[in-house]
Amino acid sequence: MSPMKIGFVLSLALLALVSVAEGGVSFKSLNRTLTVQAKIQASNATSGLAHVGTDHLVISWAFNSSFAGKDADYVNVKIRLCYAPVSQTDRGWRKTKDDLHKDKTCSKGIAKQKYVATGNTTTWRITKDVPGAIYFVRVYAVDALGTQLAFGQTTDKNKTTNLFEIVPISGRHASVDVAAAVFSVFSVGSLMGFLSLEAIKQRKLNGKAGQ
């Protein structure tokens, strides 16, 4: 084989290796070996509704014993907040892809915990940067390198059950409206006072001119 052909073959092999390295784990290849539950903790609880900045999610996970022996390589779990399909429509930046390296379904990390078969619980205050949308929670079991080995989630396969809505911060707080109203009243009062003073000054000037 000529040096040119050898170089071409080596280039193709290198490109193949790079493609594999850049690719992620296929979600379809993962077994659902974890059970996951999420509960909204709020002062004013409304079923399936949580507010950013004030409310919490209490998330519990555990290994499903029917998969005994499958968790030998599990080292940690990664808990993530995921968009439901209804909140992905016409939003390419939230698109679901089988390659987890490219998948945008679960872009918000919640917590990372050490894996134990008996499971664990975490309480997460919903951060203010979370967009308003419909969500579910997914937990990945990962190895020492962080590679996904298995998963569990709070919803069904089609991601239509046990969903919850997160309400974002409104564009304007009530206190801002009050401040704006007070400022408006003050501004009108100041303007009226200014006009009155100008009128008095003008009358005085007119009086002097007539003397």
Image: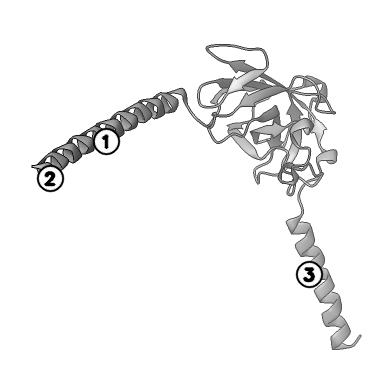
Q: Residue furthest front?
A: 211
Q: Residues within 10 Å of mark 2 (few under 14, many from 20)?
A: few
Taking the spot 84% from the left edge, 72% from the top edge, the residue there is 12
Residue 18 location in percent, x, y? 75, 63
Dot 1 falls on a residue whose secondary structure is helix
- The amino acid type, in three-letter code, at marker 3 is Leu
User: Where's the N terminus, which quadrant?
Assistant: bottom right
- In the rendered image, which residue does mark 3 sit on? 14
- Vertical relation: 55 (above or below) 23: above
- The amino acid type, in three-letter code, at marker 2 is Ala
Badge 2 or badge 3: first in the primary sequence: 3
Image marks 1 and 2: residues in contact by CB distance under 8 Å? no
Badge 1 or badge 3: first in the primary sequence: 3
Distance in Å between CA atoms under marks 1 and 2: 21 Å
- Disc 1 versus disc 2: nearer the observer: 2
Asked whether residue 58 is in view, the answer is: no
- In the rendered image, which residue does mark 2 sit on? 209
User: In the picture provided, is 209 more to the left or to the right than 117?
Assistant: left
Instruction: Count every numbered label the image shows and give the total.
Output: 3
- The amino acid type, in three-letter code, at marker 1 is Leu
Residue 159 location in percent, x, y? 80, 27
Asked whether residue 190 is in view, the answer is: yes
Image marks 1 and 3: residues in contact by CB distance under 8 Å? no
Q: Nearer the viewer, residue 147 or 92?
A: 92
Dot 3 falls on a residue whose secondary structure is helix
Q: Nearer the viewer, residue 98 or 12?
A: 98
- In the rendered image, which residue does mark 1 sit on? 195
Taking the spot 23% from the left edge, 36% from the top edge, the residue there is 199
Q: Residue furthest right?
A: 1
- Disc 2 versus disc 3: nearer the observer: 2
